[in-house]
Image (tube, coloured by chain):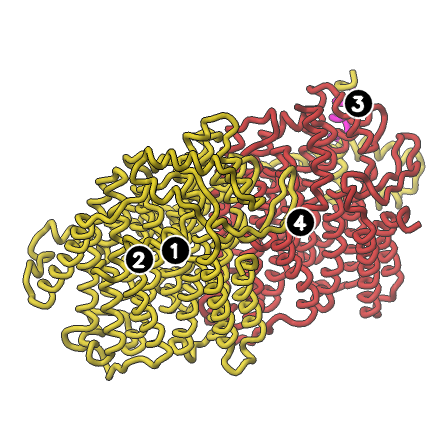
Amino acid sequence: MFDSWALTLVVFLPAVGAALLVAVPRRAENLMKLVALATTLATAAVGVAILARFDYGATDTLQFEVDRPWIDVINSRYHMGVDGISLPLLALSVLITVLCVVYSWDHFPEPHNPKAFLALMLVLETGMNGTFVGQDLILFFVFFELVLLPMYFMIGVWGGPNRQYAAIKFFLFTLFGSALMILAFLALYFKGGNTFDIPLLVERGGTIARDAQILIFGGLFMGFAIKVPMFPFHTWLPDAHTEAPTVGSVILAAVLLKLGTYGFIRIALPILPDAAQAWAPWIGGLAVVGIIYGALGCLAQKDLKRLIAFSSVAHMGFVMLGIATLTDYGINAAVFGMVAHGLITGMLFFIAGSIQERYGTREMSRLGGLLLQAPRLAWLLGFCAMASLGLPGLAGFWGEFPAILSAYQPAPGLSEALFRVYMVVAAVGTVFAAGYLLWMYQRTAFGTAKKEFAEAHVHDVHLPEWLAWAPLLLLILILGIFPSLIFRVTDGAVQSMTSALQAIGG
Amino acid sequence: MLENAWVIPALPVLSFVLILFFGKRLPKHGHEIGVAAVALAFVLACVCAVQWVQRPANLEVKPGSEEHAAAPGSPAQANAVAALEEKAPPGSEGGHEGEGKGEKEGEAGEHEAEPIRKPVVKEVTWFDNGQTRVKAGTHVDGLAVTMMFVVTLISLLVHVFSTSYMHGDRRYTHYFAALSLFTAGMLVMVTANNTLQLLVGWELMGLCSFMLIGHWWEERNNSNAALKAFFTTRTGDVGLLIGIAILFFAAGQTFDIADINAAALGGEVSHGLVLAGAAALLCGVIGKSAQFPLHTWLPDAMAGPTPVSALIHAATMVVAGVYLVARLYGVFWSGFDIGGGGINPVALVGGITVLIAAALAFVQTDIKKVLAYSTVSQLGYMVMALGVGAWTAGVFHLVTHAFFKGLLFLGAGSVSHAVHSFDMKKDMGGLREHMPITFKTFVIGSLALAGVPPLAGFWSKDEILLGASSNGYPVFLVIGLLGAALTAAYMTRCVYLTFFGEYRGHGQPHESPPAITVPLVVLAALSVVAGFVNVPGGEWFAKWTENETVLSAGVAHHSFSPFVALFGSALGLLGIAAGYAYYWRNLGPHRLTQRSGAAGTGYRILENKYGLDRLYTDWVVGGIKGPIARGAYWFNQRVIDGVVNGVGIIARGLARFVYDTVDQKVVDGVVNGAGIGAEDGGRVLRLMQTGRVQQYALFLFGAVVVLGGTLVLFTTG
């Protein structure tokens, strides 16, 4: 009973919560928060139940599967399921949303309006969860697009001074990719024997002619690469992050970016194995360019939040490099990297938001001496910076190093020499990461406060912040020490995928 | 205890956590936990050492398995691996072959025929990834036991010393927490059975050195030094990461160190691959162990508290690189063909470092910087020793150096505790009367460092020189001898400026309290006696530490050469004599730098540290942080975003056109004609007009659908 309803619940509970919120009277602010919290907690509880009942011995099969007719005319079905690749991301998504509600408790950005803000967050969660469990291209597409609007409004209404531009840029950029993506979906429908069903297409995809595959992959690539975002389609990201309210940035970094990389792993690679082979060197190339380029972008920043945003470009480069190797090692690393980046960069955005709230600025040249004024906050910033630069023993390492490692020996058929060059470039990227993160830390945390803030009374981390951050901090540490917590979930699914890839593509 | 060696690194980790969270509330502000944990770790390390010495030696290793491996099936490698995993006694024919081999090589036979102690390996599954099962665990052999002993001992003394030295510091508790974690990092590294775990310890130390060098981060200089240390070692780490990746695949998808060594020596892996792996790892060593040309961070690291310098220089951090070479010796041995003589990168890097750092030590006025360059130079000796095939000598020098360099740094700390300065020329002089214990122990340390017999430094340095001369590396023998003379001379200068002449500082300096002097005395005693552990005739140290990798590589042993020993100590004494003549007797060319242009130029080159700092800070880092990063960002904002915004503007123009001409004149006419209320129509239009987004979206989407329709038709057709 539960098994057949679990995914529907985890996807649509937040939407129900959003509808309930709309009914709450405008003045009852606490009630709104409670409704939102209860909804996200209930969703998370379903998520935990899924985690508990998941069969870890069979991570390569779809579990909690639902498969019902939906839109008969186009053969689209209401097909949902989780396997080892989607499970960690689904868990990440339900966790982050709860924490965002907790953090928002008394942090509502101007122009306040908690009802709309929370409702948007819940709609966003429906979209995110749906994307991770959808096993039908149309269903996937609907959820994939569903996240656009709430995020657009979050940036456009609650954002910073330049919010209009950032929101429109985010919206149009992503929409442009989506348009090409839906095209590719249509092509798959016709080429794959009139079906949108992902597992079915995976079986049939290999039979599509190589040239057609490459073309279709191009459409998917545009859709997903913009979302990731990969160089050179990344310019919407720094603007969106800089302008978005804290919670918006956190969700954007922690979950939304993963929709793109997830799309590559779930749809583009397994359905179009020949095209994946052909595209992989280009993807890998753009990925390592992104690693260095994103890092250079970071080094040029004066704004703390914009720096973190650029660091996302670099980190997602590692994820994409792992994916481009088409090896089990690389893709395992990619999934780990997605979760780790979600936790770490999410945390960094939280801290950046709290710093802005305390000082009213994110200009690093005006900050300094955080360790003296708010030592706990500064320690947390240092911890996350270390995690972000890939210190072994913390979560970031397991996304970064295995990706570098896997590039040494990419899947058969890919140029070893080329990928070894990528490996070296990516490894050099780790020095750059240390550079911009520690330099950022030096400017914000070390030294003494600048004159304008010398007398300021700065509140150290307070309770809602602890509550929202503790799970992330613990997970960064625990996953860093016990990487098998994720690897054992993803490994089976990834292995069966890559072996199929090689069987067809090799 | 050997089975449960994981407890030893776990203790300081635990202490770190406890100090961090509860330290401030404790009566001693956390140092009691740190001292207790490290003391316990030291006791356990001693237990390990005793058990190791008592362990029956019943593993026979064939030397020179490179030749054997050419035979089908590579029995050498198989044996080595089997022996490790199953702890089964290897086939007797292996030992027999080994003896035969040994006889042919004459000198080398004596030790290789002797069985060694089997390493104690304990592993648990860490994670599965792809086809690989990665196991975490401890690999305890003589090398690991030795390192555990040295690390915990030095760390314990540093902890005790710090309770007095750091008394009243603004971040006393954090200091002890970081000290614990630092110790833990090194212990994790020396007990690691796989390269990933080794990397964890390695980077953990990088983090702790960052925290401790930048301990007084209010001043910009200190945080700059901390960043510099982290960046420089991290630059070397690029090589380490790549090296681990190469060796992972070279050894057949494993991180296991024993397997990697066996594979590298087994001869089945292509030489090019092992060479690439060794070269990459060497980059990591150069960064971490402050070898030329990445040695520049170490003198700056003096910005940290002095006991930390003692810990970094004697037992952790910088010796990690040397340890890496010693641990993965199979890779270096076969990659660089160390057994073959000639010149190889490891020996070369070490040799260059010996001399350039020793020269720099002469122009320093800061007592800690003299010692820092001295460490760089001595690390050069260790690396050079490993590079010329004198494995045991390199490791032995690591141990003896830990004692006397730890002693010297703590001595410098004791001095600065009294005079509140590190400047030898301005604030010291004549301290031998005021600080007798510090003076005596410091002199012992200096003599040991200078290689005066029979102190510890003499024995280990002698073995390095012996190895260089007997293994066919005459160039490095000369470098070693020259370095010995320089070392003795700069230490004489240092002792003179600090303890002799007139006191030039302020106030009345006093001898330090027992928490400071007791560690000095302990280390001084060790600096005197430690050398006898591997005295010719006994060579217990070699028997305890030499492991399977070293023996199966066929590292040569040489009997004591009075000639080399005499030469080595004579040059050391000569250096001391020269220093004595120059400073005490005022002989020799004083004020040469003012009188001679060439000498002045040389002095300035040394003062500018060969210009390397300027090259790195101003050109490399400054270049990347400045013009290159700004250029990339300009490209981002102007070019890429320019295109994006351009597309947006064009789309808007097109939309405007569509709206004005098509929509208003054509569609609207139809709409109105169809009889829909004017009000409704107007509202819809107003919405479209003001809601620019919808307009864009519609336009974009429409265009793409048209495009897509064509595409679908095209591909299906």
* Residue A473 at least partly seen: yes
Whether residues under marks 3 and 2 lie with C-beta atoms below 8 angstroms apart, the answer is no
Task: Please check whether the numbered discs 3 and 4 fall on a single chain.
Answer: yes
Majority SS type along the magenta span: helix
Q: On the image, numbered disc 4 is attached to which residue?
A: A484
* Chain B display color: yellow
Please tell me whether residue B711 belongs to the stretch shown in magenta. yes
Q: On the image, numbered disc 2 is attached to which residue?
A: B375
User: Is B209 located above or below residue A222 in the figure?
Assistant: below
Whether residues under marks 3 and 4 lie with C-beta atoms below 8 angstroms apart, the answer is no
Tag 1's secondary structure?
A: helix
Q: CA distance from mark 1 to mark 3?
A: 61 Å
Q: Amino acid at mark 3?
A: Lys
Residue at 16% across / 73% down in the picture? B500
Whether residues under marks 1 and 2 lie with C-beta atoms below 8 angstroms apart, the answer is yes
Whether residues under marks 1 and 3 lie with C-beta atoms below 8 angstroms apart, the answer is no
Q: Position of residue A310 (x, y in %)?
A: 56, 48
Residue at 28% across / 39% down in the picture? B471
